[in-house]
Image (tube, rainbow, N blue to C red):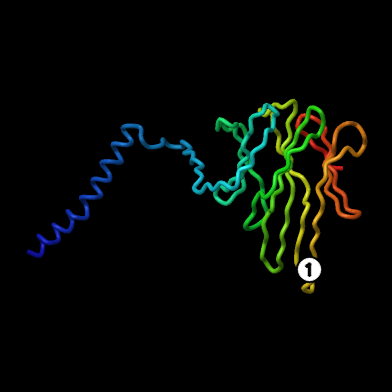
Amino acid sequence: MHQSLIFLLFLLLVGPLRAQDERYYRQILGGGLPKQDERVEEASVTQFNVSGAAYYFDLNQDKLEEVIRPQKRDGVDWLEISHSSGTKIFEAKLQAMGAESSIYKIKVVNISQTVRAAIIFLDEGYTKGRKFESTARIFVLSFENNDLSKMVLTEGPHHFHEKEAQRDQYWRRDLMVNVYDIDGDGIREITVQYNSIQRIMKYKGNGEWKRI
């Protein structure tokens, strides 16, 4: 009787393992498992996708509004642009600094007779280590001759900075963002300024900006 119980327990343990082995060998014979030294690529899948408030602009002046939609994908800020028909024409990731980052304003401007740009205001969030710190910066999405297939996104300077300094001091700097032709060459510059502090972005062509 004792030996029969041991044999029964052996069958219960070996049965599932044997079934597993059979499935494994069937996969090998059918080509379902990776071969030796074969690299297995892992797909990048967005787990959480949250859309913010949409902005509607006629970017290319064809009397049809495009949709600019800020998104959160796995906690990262993205910008997605679609035609009025719903066809996606552009998307880009915006790097932020800390928690609760978000796009909170978009302004479309003419840089010249042939160049337009969308100035995107990104609250980069905050960090709470030993000291609190919060920043915001602009991004510039530019394109020429109303061609939305060649839009280029450029990271701009900070226009807001707030932090706790040493010895429990606190300071905050909020700079103005303006667009005007500084040197009179017919191409408007983007300026971020506060009193004597001035950061200038000058358009060089083909989506390229130079900081002065």
Give the total number of marks visible in the rendering: 1
State whether residue 195 is above or below residue 169.
above
Q: Is residue 154 visible?
A: no
Residue drawn 81% across the image and 34% down it: 111
Kind of element beneath mark 1: strand
Q: Residue furthest left?
A: 1
Q: Residue furthest front?
A: 63
Nearest the viewer among 77 and 187 is 187
Nearest the viewer among 94 and 71 is 71
**Image coords of residue 145 (percent x, y):** 74, 25
State whether residue 109 is above or below residue 167.
above
Q: Residues within 10 Å of mark 1 (few under 14, many from 20)?
A: few
**Image coords of residue 189 (percent x, y):** 85, 39
Query: What's under tag 1, amino acid-wise?
Result: Tyr
Query: Is residue 184 shown left or right of residue 165?
Result: right
Write down the quadrant of residue 91 in the picture. Answer: top right
Nearest the viewer among 7 and 108 is 108
The residue labelled by disc 1 is 170
Residue drawn 54% across the image and 49% down it: 74
State whether residue 173 is above or below residue 141.
below
Write down the quadrant of residue 147 in the picture. Answer: top right
Write down the quadrant of residue 139 in the picture. Answer: top right
Residue drawn 64% across the image and 38% down it: 56
In the picture, the quarter occupied by the N terminus is: bottom left
Q: Is residue 11 visible?
A: yes
Query: Is residue 137 shown left or right of residue 77?
Result: right
